[in-house]
Image (spheres, grey):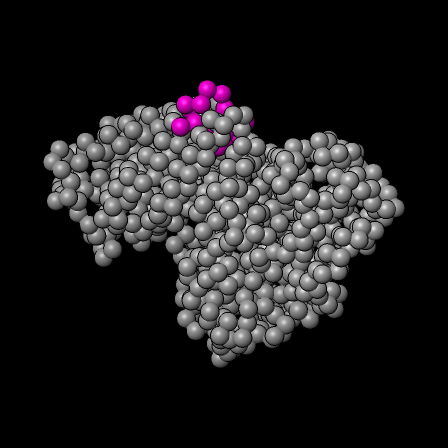
Amino acid sequence: MEEPLMNARAAGTNSIVVPRDAGRPYLTAAQAAARQLELPVQPADSPDASAINIGPADFVGDCAGAAAMVASAPSDKRWDLIYQTDEGGWLVTGATEFAAAHALLSLADWLRWAEPLPQPYRMLRTPAFHSMTMEFDDWSAGFTRLADGFDMARHVADAARVGIEALEINLLADAVPIQVRERRVYEDMYQWWCIYSPGLDMFFESDLTRGTYRRAMLQRNLDKLLATAELCRDWGIMPTFIAFEPRVWPERLYDKYPDLRGARVDCSDYSAEAEFAPDPNHPHVLEHYSEMMTQLMEAVPDLGLFSIWSQDSNAGFPWAQKLYPGPNGPRAARKRPVEDGVVNLMTALRDAGRRVNPNLQLTICGSWFVGDEVPAIARALPDDIGMSFTTRPGAWERIETIRECGREPQVQVEELSNPWKPLGPILGIPAPWKVFEMLCDISQNGRVEDLVLRGGIQSEVFVPHFITNEVIRAFLFEGSGLDVDGLVRQRAAAWTDSDAEAAALIEAWRLCDAAVRAVRVNAWTVNFVSGRTLWRRMVRPIVPNQALLTVEDTCYYRHLEFTVGHTDPAWVDHFYKGWGRMVTDADAHAALTNYDRNILPALHQAIKRLDAVETLSETSRDVRDRIECFYRVFRTDRNLMEVQEAIHACLAEDREHPERSGHVRRIRERIEDELENVRAFIELIQTSPSTLIPTTSWEETTFIHRSPFDHLLKLKLDRMLRHLDDVPGPWFAELEQPGGWTSDQREQMPEA
């Protein structure tokens, strides 16, 4: 093997050549690679053997070796060819424009990062998965689409670089969804779930809904959708529409059409008024969806996938076994099994969509259907309508259930590039070895053909040089044979300035990987992205008694807290949601051991390891700050859980005089520790050049904090100092109900 290539110019290349009539993805990829390699882009009628060339297969056909490899390419799956010429140039092509574009971006990175390639490098690659797409992308349609500094064009480009073949284009233009602005009770919170994956009626009108929403709002949303579709076309990425349906209608529509009312789709834990979706069994509702689907396809005729999620987030089918208030719906629909409603809606969408694009795919996600509903739906759906399902590595039983019904599902897996649930809203936490093991299990044990990254990717817009994405990109073609240790070493060497720094970076990555593996979610309302955003637990004060906080104390966060009703104990106790106990004292106490043994020490050690390096590169500094952010947020989680558990212990000993309990000492120690933690967190946010937590200067929503984040932490610090000496509490009746007082730590804790 000869010496590895150092850069494009050292290899003798002087330009990037594209055909004169090149399609947009070829030209877009060429321009992106040219910026990275500092080379000009030259249009030509034929390839230049000393340049980097990208184009369709016939463009590289003049080279006999490349032509022979193209001729051997499979006809039933995606492939790409990266071929080094005898003159030191490169020929890049693929089964599709996207495949070629992705291959060129890979080559550009190899060249600029001095990848140790065999000489000459000539490889026809086929991916480990039939397709790799994403749904519920946090950025293109999710919680953080309006984060300060977000650049959709760069996000789409990085998705292409990683190998993502599809991107959802239905995102709202406004910060606050219309369902929130039109809520009948101001304190109602459930309508906020309409902020992501908006339905068709947020873009189009039908004869039923004409005049229901302001056309200016619909046009803003449609303009955003069309602009995102154009970005997809730049890269050959398939535009998709991912929606929760049938989704809630405003009550004024049911005043006009009472017989169209379908399932109740709100949640009484944090809703004040009942909300209803239309009945998909009614012919007028099906015509409504057909009209809107036709308009969508006429606006985006190359739309490749329409995917429905349901039974959550203000959407649901009537008389399913599980909706938030229980099985419900109109009398006529009760006579039908739930799969009838699913088939009715999906076939109406299919028939309308395929009149414009015969290749349109449609899927229904089965994840929120329960019991025997999933196999019943799988058997009832027409063969040309697909099914997806969300799972995790190692949990393949439900996937096999769908396969037993004669279907190969699209498998949605969370926590690959964007582990937003357990770690959110922190950005860019590296776990390369964990993700590699997940991908191996997905490929080998799950036998997944169509992989969907649920949650999308954390792209270079906010997370440059994200080692996790490098593992995903490499695994796509190397599969379980990937030398992940070798890949990590190569990237560390390319992204740092010395061998010593590279070694420190690798060790920090490994320690962080170990901490991520140890993360355990006790409740989605507490130590989970929802707890940190919807309940504002990162920025709300940790105090001995939340009932003593004044309106002035809480005004910066309480209006966004997902708690409804003035008597709801969730306002004053972190372990409650609605009137239900989410975390037992025993579970909280056990969680402290995990934080103290497995998570916080590993993160602290990783920070110290990088701090020991005299001068850090931009990448190492970025990784170091992200790990410290991880440490600060999880230290808050840990302190919050012990303070709340210790408050309960004080009340258990003497509800009239909880200040006499020995557990008061624990409360004071944890609050003082949190004060120190918050001060350090403020300094980190103020001094780090990285975007560690997404914030917005737009209107603040329940899912994203307002800018600047350090200001919110300062308010938290101020409130904690005001209430440092408060008496522990409060006691409330629900603590004595079943599910409350589930554990008393008096016998387990040392004497004060």
Q: Is residue 63 above or below residue 446?
A: above
Residue 593 seen in the figure:
yes
Q: Residue furthest front?
A: 1
Q: Residue 524's spot in the image, x, y percent?
A: 38, 49
**Residue depicted at x 46% and y 57%:** 441
**Residue depicted at x 31% and y 51%:** 582
Please check the rendered image and state whether residue 467 is part of the magenta-colored stretch, yes or no.
no
Q: Is residue 194 left or right of residue 304?
A: left
Q: Residue furthest right?
A: 45
Q: Quadrant of the C terminus?
A: top left
Q: Quadrant of the N terminus?
A: top right
Toward which corner of the image does residue 77 lie, by quadrant? bottom right
Q: Is residue 584 above or below residue 444?
A: above
Toward which corner of the image does residue 683 lie, by quadrant? top left
**Boundaries of the magenta span:** 609-626
**Residue depicted at x 54% and y 54%:** 479
Q: Residue 337's spot in the image, x, y percent?
A: 49, 77
Q: Is residue 220 above or below residue 342?
A: above
Residue 328 seen in the figure:
no
Q: Residue furthest top?
A: 614
Name the foreground residue: 735 vs 86.
86
Name the foreground residue: 670 vs 537.
670
Q: Residue 159's spot in the image, x, y percent?
A: 62, 46
Q: Residue 727's spot in the image, x, y percent?
A: 21, 33
